[in-house]
Image: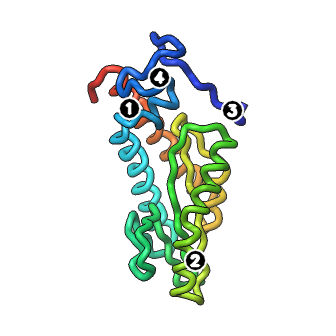
Amino acid sequence: NTATLPVLAIPGKKNNELCRRCKKTVENLPHVLVGCDLSNTFWNLRHNTIVYFLAEQLRIHTDAKVSVDTPCNYTGSPRRPDIVLEFKRNSHIYLIDVKCPYQTMEGIEKTNDNNIYYYMDLANKIGGVMPRWTVQVLTVIVGTPGTWPDISTKTLVKIGIRSNIIKTIARHCVLSNIRWSAAQWKFHRDGIM
């Protein structure tokens, strides 16, 4: 069932046992992969690996200027979308945020809505400075347990990526996410990278 993901207990742990690392909450797979503060290095590595791969693919497969993790200097906003695409031919700017949640499909939709809301003020500021340009906020979500929701495909279709390329991008992002999640789990369990 794609609507729900099980909250898996950790092998060898009782269902209500606290996290062996942070000792703050119950240790389960969602906590280990996206909730334990002592794993934030893995969050960043997993996320950034996907961002930089996606940015490289967008450079190859579009005619847009691609910026990664840079502030939009002409607005004065401190917000830094993961990827900014500027298409001069049709005066479009896309602010793309990448997320790697461990959530149900309903949670993924909420993540998308939150991202759009978070970057909407930046999009409006850019639109105010560049009134002839259309600015949109888009999201690419790659679920930590290895999911690629439709919203991610729709984002890539919207910016003009062909379906066969989208499949390759999705496969790479999902496999990368799974590899980093496995490494994170091993580190959490054993304390070694």
Residue at 39% across / 63% down in the picture? 69
Disc assigned to residue 184: 1
Q: Secondary structure at mark 3?
A: loop
Q: Amino acid at mark 4?
A: Glu
Disc 1 or disc 4, which is closer to the eye?
4
Q: Which residue is mark 4?
A: 27
Q: Would you say the residues marked 4 and 3 are in contact, meaning their CB atoms lie under 8 Å apart?
A: no
Separation of residues labelled 1 and 4 (CA atoms): 14 Å
Q: Would you say the residues marked 1 and 4 are in contact, meaning their CB atoms lie under 8 Å apart?
A: no
Q: Which residue is mark 2?
A: 124
Relative to 90, does residue 140 appear above or below in the rendering? Answer: above
- Mark 4 Cα within 10 Å, few/some/many (few <14, many 20+)? many
Q: Residue furthest front?
A: 24
Mark sitting earlier along the chain (3/2) = 3
Q: Residue furthest left?
A: 192
Separation of residues labelled 4 and 3 (CA atoms): 19 Å
Separation of residues labelled 1 and 3 (CA atoms): 23 Å
Tell me the quarter of the image containing the N terminus.
top right
Residue 12, horizontal then vertical, whole percent:
45, 10
Disc 4 or disc 3, which is closer to the eye?
4
Residue at 41% across / 69% down in the picture? 78
Q: Is residue 23 left or right of residue 125?
A: left
Separation of residues labelled 2 and 4 (CA atoms): 41 Å
Q: Secondary structure at mark 4?
A: loop
Q: Which residue is mark 3?
A: 4
Q: Amino acid at mark 2?
A: Asn
